[in-house]
Image: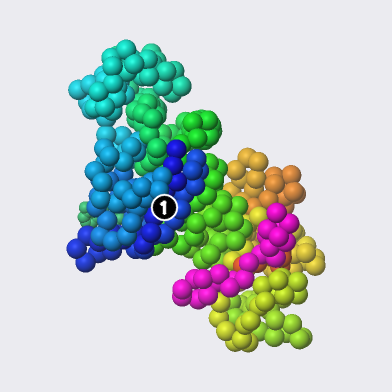
Amino acid sequence: MAEIEINSLVKRFGAFQAVQDVNITVNDGEFVFLLGPSGCGKTTTLRMIAGLEMPSDGRIAIGGRNVTFLRPRHRNVGMVFQDYGLYRHLTVFGNIAYPLEVRRLERAEIARKVEAVARTMQISEVLQRKPDQLSAGQLQRVAIARMLVRDADVFLMDEPMSHLDAQLRGQMRAELRHIQKSVGVTTIFVTHDQLEAMTMADRIIVMKDGEMLQFATPREIFERPATEFVATFVGEPQMNVFDVRVARIEDRLAAVTEDFVIPFDQAWAQANRLDLRVGQTVRLGIRPEHISIGDRAEAAHGLPAELYSFEPTGAENLYVLRCGDVTVTTRSSTTQTAHLAKHEGSRLFAGFDPKWIYLFETGAGRTIAQAAASQTEAEEA
Ligand SMILES: Nc1ncnc2c1ncn2[C@@H]1O[C@H](COP(=O)(O)OP(=O)(O)OP(=O)(O)O)[C@@H](O)[C@H]1O
Ligand SMILES: [Mg+2]
């Protein structure tokens, strides 16, 4: 087991910076996710930790030992590659045994270890098959077994579930989280799937364009996102964000658009030490679960809206509404909205819960104000 410490890590390919100044400390036994869109530098970062790619700058230490320029086999790191990287001419047994053979373990011990890990990964029945005789789910289990079989200090996993169907992914999420916690080996897991990261991680690093935007627990990432990008990347359906202008209405600051006004909540403004200029343009964010809908104009839902599209998901109803020029997605339980109209063009009313509003800078996207509700909870914790 080991802590991973990364300082000022940079990777350039010619003039292109694939990874810019990554700084993280992953604690001993921690399950950390590297989350970001395609091309943001996740694989490159992981390959530098594994020793498969040399950094252009920076330092990597595992268990207090500087490994920045060590060869992969001197780092004691187990890895699952994005394409699995299994040997097609070897059986499943041969593939899992390979890292142990390289280390010249005795045959009996190799067999014992391979069989034990095959039981954990539920692939005992396919040990004599070749990779091209396996299903996607089995292939993935073999790749994970090959990583687990070694007594590695660190596990690195690059999108290990991206080839699986939705149902298998759901099963594997729980299984992998369970295995990681029971072996207790420090693990970095790369994914572009926010649900995977949110459900499995101890902490998440959100990356974009080679840059690290935030490194925090799933709950912090969700409730206190550092930027608009982070806010919209986690959560499904994603946070609604649109341009507003700051105005003063009857002694109170409010967000206004061409079509409606959202007065700011006093406690929320105070908690955020809100410092806005009247006339300033900002981006207002609110998650779908914090917009209520009704069929009459009441205090709770005062904004006239037109139903753009109705999307039932089973347990929940998604209503996509047009409030003037702004389109928002709302989310509510099926029972709450059972009585509401469901055909496009219906007149409805929307209510934005003022305690759950976020504000982001126009342009850079840095968070200016967080939901008040999340702040109280964070302080309680
Ligand atoms: N050997 C290379 N030479 C030049 N550019 C590279 C090389 N490897 C990666 N890149 C570029 O670096 C960037 C980051 O690539 P990387 O594979 O790390 O992204 P990723 O986050 O893993 O994406 P994905 O989710 O698609 O796997 C991309 O723009 C990619 O084209
Ligand atoms: Mg990748």
Left or right of 234 on screen, residue 133: left
Residue 367 sits inside the magenta stretch: yes
Residue 22 sits inside the magenta stretch: no
Mark 1 Cβ and ligand 1 under 8 Å apart: no
Q: Which residue sits at x=66%, y=64%?
A: 371
Displayed quadrant of residue 347: bottom right
Q: Which residues are magenta?
A: 359-381
Q: Amino acid at mark 1?
A: Glu
Label 1 sits on residue: 5
Q: Which residue sits at x=59%, y=56%?
A: 220
Left or right of 294 on screen, residue 363: left
Is residue 364 depicted above or below 171 in this figure?
below
Mark 1: give few (<14), some (14-19) or many (20+) Cα within 10 Å.
Answer: some
Please state the horizontal and vertical placement of residue 323, each as a whole percent of the image: 62, 68
Left or right of 173 on screen, residue 150: left
Please state the horizontal and vertical placement of residue 296, each as a whole percent of the image: 78, 62
Please state the horizontal and vertical placement of residue 237, each as a whole percent of the image: 55, 53
- Looking at this view, name the residue that lies furthest to the front: 64
Q: Which residue sits at x=46%, y=75%?
A: 363
Front position in the image: 3 or 333:
3
Answer whether residue 308 is visible to the viewer in this image: no
